[in-house]
Amino acid sequence: MSKKHRIAALFIFMAVMVIAPMAFASEGGGAGDEGRYAGFFSYIALGCVVGLGLAAGGGGIGMGNAVSGAVNAMARNPGFYGKIFTNMLIGLALIESLVIYTLVVVLLLLYANPLL
């Protein structure tokens, strides 16, 4: 598959993901106003999935780079193993906390429906 086909497939997939919630949204007429905000909550759910995926992917890449740098530093200077290892663990904890904060925000957006 050429690069042009991959880019076209990606844009088609993104267009379908944006249009699908509007196409499948109900027109209301139920007991409450759930149908009125159906498209809005679909976009919130889609944004949460994309945001959490980006945060987890970025966190994984950052952790990989941090561990790689720390292992290289420990191999070059084994005398500072304790300090390097401690700083690496603190950095990994801070990176992981950013992903957990993203998860908390996603769960708040999904389960705290302010419009209903």
Image (spheres, rainbow, N blue to C red):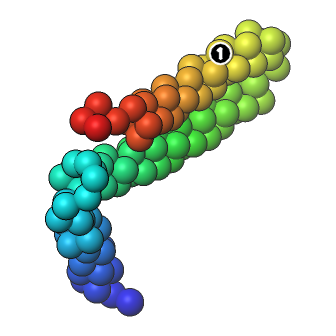
* In this picture, residue 65 sits left or right of residue 72: left
The residue lying toward the viewer, choosing from 60 and 45, is 45
Q: Is residue 97 above or below residue 87?
A: below
Image coordinates for residue 15, horizontal then vertical, percent:
21, 71
Kind of residue indicated by mark 1: Ile
- Neighbour class for label 1 at 10 Å: few (<14), some, many (≥20)? few
The residue lying toward the viewer, choosing from 114 and 31, is 31
* Residue found 56% across the figure and 23% down from its top: 97
Image coordinates for residue 39, horizontal then vertical, percent:
23, 57
Tell me, yes or no, if residue 76 can be seen here: no
The residue lying toward the viewer, choosing from 8 and 30, is 30
Image coordinates for residue 6, horizontal then vertical, percent:
32, 80
* Residue found 23% across the figure and 65% down from its top: 26
The residue lying toward the viewer, choosing from 84 and 25, is 25
Residue placed under numbered mark 1 in the picture: 90
* In this picture, residue 8 sits left or right of residue 55: left
* Residue found 80% across the figure and 16% down from its top: 81
Tell me, yes or no, if residue 88 can be seen here: yes
* In this picture, residue 61 sits left or right of residue 88: left
Question: From the image, which quarter does the N terminus lie in?
Answer: bottom left
Image coordinates for residue 68, horizontal then vertical, percent:
65, 37
